[in-house]
């Protein structure tokens, strides 16, 4: 009967293994449910982030639905302002992108030629060493 006692797994190893398996199970669940989980996670994040502002407005005697509406309008206006602020610079950057890529190509061309020469020398050195080893 001592045989079963000797094979008993220590509790801390069992707890670690259980924790690891639970973590893996959660990771697999989140991976396969990511299409549904991401909107829920964003909603929970926004709830945690914005509920203090709603609570402050509610303490100022603003009805809770109106407070939520006010906070959401402020967030949407802030987002729209951020998009408006970066819209023109992004558009200008995209318009200049072809010229910028041509300039980069011109600056990289000498490096490409140098790397091609290095590759050629490496290939020749490899052939020379191959020829030396076959002669022996």
Image (cartoon, rainbow, N blue to C red):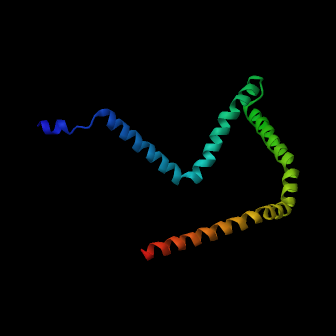
Residue located at (83% from left, 60% from top): 100
Q: Position of residue 72 (x, y in %)?
A: 76, 39
Instruction: Tell me: residue 136, above or below residue 43.
Output: below
Between residues 14 and 44, which one lies in front from this camera angle? 14
Instruction: Tell me: residue 126, above or below residue 66.
Output: below
Q: Position of residue 135 (x, y in %)?
A: 44, 76
Q: Position of residue 8 (x, y in %)?
A: 22, 37
Between residues 56 and 13, which one lies in front from this camera angle? 13
Location of residue 97 (image quadrant): bottom right
Instruction: Tell me: residue 93, above or below residue 73.
Output: below
Please state if 94 lies on the left or on the right of 119 as rendered: right
Residue located at (85% from left, 55% from top): 93
Instruction: Tell me: residue 102, above or below residue 7.
Output: below
Location of residue 23 (image quadrant): top left
Please state if 33 lies on the left or on the right of 136 as rendered: right
Q: Position of residue 116 (x, y in %)?
A: 68, 69
Location of residue 79 (image quadrant): top right
């Amino acid at each position: 009967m001592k045989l079963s006692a000797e094979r008993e797994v220590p509790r801390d190893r069992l707890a670690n293994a259980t924790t690891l398996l639970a973590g893996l199970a959660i990771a697999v669940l989140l991976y396969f449910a990511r299409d549904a989980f991401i909107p829920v996670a964003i909603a929970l994040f926004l709830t945690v982030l914005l509920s203090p502002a709603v609570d402050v407005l509610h303490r100022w005697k603003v009805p809770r639905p109106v407070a939520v509406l006010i906070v959401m309008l402020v967030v949407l206006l802030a987002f729209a302002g951020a998009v408006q602020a970066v819209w023109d610079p992004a558009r200008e950057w995209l318009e200049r992108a072809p010229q910028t890529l041509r300039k980069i190509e011109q600056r990289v061309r000498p490096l490409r030629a140098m790397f091609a020469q290095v590759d050629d020398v490496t290939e020749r050195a490899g052939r020379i060493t191959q020829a030396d080893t076959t002669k022996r």
